[in-house]
Amino acid sequence: SQTITEFDTIAAISTPPGEGAISIVRLSGEEALATAERVFKGRDLTQVASHTINYGHIVEPSSGEEVDEVMVSVMKAPKTFTREDVIEINCHGGIVATNRILQLLLSNGARLAEPGEFTKRAFLNGRIDLSQAEAVMDLIRAKTDKSMKVALNQLDGNLAGLIRNLRQDILDVLAQVEVNIDYPEYDDVETMTTRLLLEKARDVKSRIAELLSTAQQGKVLREGLATAIVGRPNVGKSSLLNHLLHEDKAIVTDVAGTTRDVIEEYVNVKGVPLKLVDTAGIHETDDKVEKIGVERSKQALEAADLVMLVINGSEPLTAEDRQLIDLTADSKRIVIVNKTDLPQQVTLPELQTLIGDDAIISTAVVTSAGMDQLEDKIAELFFGGIENSQTTVMVTNARHIGLLNQATQALDDVMTGIAAGMPVDLVQIDMTRAWDLLGEITGDSVQDELLTQLFSQFCLGK
Ligand code: GDP
Ligand code: ZN
């Protein structure tokens, strides 16, 4: 049920705000060509061939005043992103000129697009599926090249393809069950039917589990790998953080315990988006101000996907170092022996026995020694497996993960229902629910409200 207004002509600036080299104002809808023609001087845009770029000027229709020199792309339906007529006006990018062009279009037949409305139309007009639409949003937000690749993969529709296969399999078994119920003269119909359902529920559940197992890495790509840097005061945590950031954002001093605040920063380490958390050191202290930092650091440690434990190699291990080694034992951990430019007091074999299989990286942050090896280690820890598998589908989207978990629950209900000897028609309901939930991922069964909410998250002009 689409209202008329969904097919009126919309316009928005589709390049990011700011003084770029060029800006693009985009129009989509039945009146796109006519609207552009009213403010364009050059060729007659309503007469040019589709998919052409046309040189000319944007003019104020009433006064004839020239606003900007432009290139206008004319793309006629249906071979466009929205499957409607689309016009893209490439202008010189000054904020004032771009806004004036937009205003002119708005006063000559177009309406300002809502956030995500171009993508919403592409979806409503059947051009893309919902997981692809969300991939567009992820692309806009992607933090590193690798994140971008995962989003692009989803844009290809790989996830949607997998989900549609799962749904088809469920549908097949539901159809089979219907047939069996309709012909109860067969022997042992009930047993045969429940066996079919049970096998399919197990099969689909394990394929969903495989997809969900990619979600952790997917989350890392989307949100960044939460990384806590811990160590007793003065071992070089802030220096390490600054080095990774390549700028002086954390405070470095010679006085022990001076990094009081927990600072969060993103940094791209060989394609891994790290969400860095600098800590004040998690030692016990009576100092009130520092205690706030200490408490927060403990929380950061709990939330961390990766812990970098820094040790000062130029001093013997202290009780505090050993305490930190114990505290971080269950975390994914890299132990960094810093200050290797100074005479060393920590013996590596001894340290290795304390930390088990975890990696030790020797560094001297002040000379950059070992920093490459550290960055390699971080990348290796998390993307060793992904590097060679660009074609595999990865689930990165929180909404998709939620739906896959719910579908798993519905399949569990199928299995426990069968085990409890529930009637087949009740088991069928749970199976159908799994089918519905999977359909919400691709948008094959979504309500209007969800759509509006989803697309409103997009940037304006997409
Ligand atoms: P934090 O308290 O653990 O954050 O330690 P900081 O990063 O504030 O560093 C404490 C002091 O150690 C500063 O004077 C740093 O310049 C110094 N430092 C950090 N890394 C190294 C290193 O690799 N070698 C040497 N010689 N000094 C370092
Ligand atoms: Zn510090």
Image (cartoon, rainbow, N blue to C red):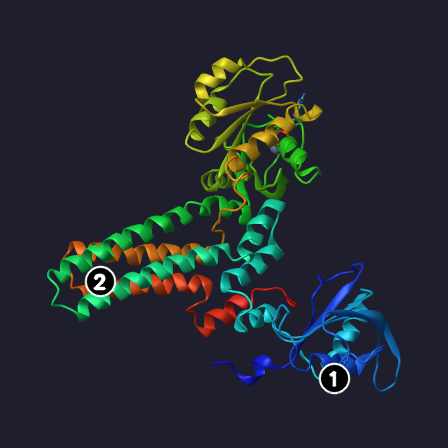
The C terminus - image quarter? bottom right
For mark 1, give the secondary structure: loop
Disc on res. 108: 1
Q: Residue 184 location, x and y as percent?
A: 13, 68
Amino acid bearing label 2: Val
Nearest the eye: 360 or 429: 429
- Determine crowd level at label 2: few under 14, some 14-19, many 20+ residues with C-alpha closer than 10 A: many
Residue 49 place in picture, x, y as percent: 75, 75
Residue 307: % across, % down: 51, 34
Q: Position of residue 390 (x, y in %)?
A: 54, 44
**Is 225 situated left or right of 435 in this image?**
right
Front one among 452 and 290: 452
Q: Label 2's element? A: helix
- Asked whether the viewer can see residue 115, the reply is no
User: Which class describes the residues within 10 Å of circle 1: few (<14), some (14-19), or many (20+)?
Assistant: some
Kindly identify the residue that appears in the image at 76 percent across and 64 percent down.
23
Residue identified by numbered label 2? 427
Q: Quick one: which residue is furthest to the bottom in this view?
A: 62
Q: Would the CB of label 2 be found within 8 Å of ligand 2?
A: no
- Mark 2–mark 1 distance (CA, rounded to whole Å): 57 Å
Please identify the quarter of the rendering in which residue 438 is found: bottom left
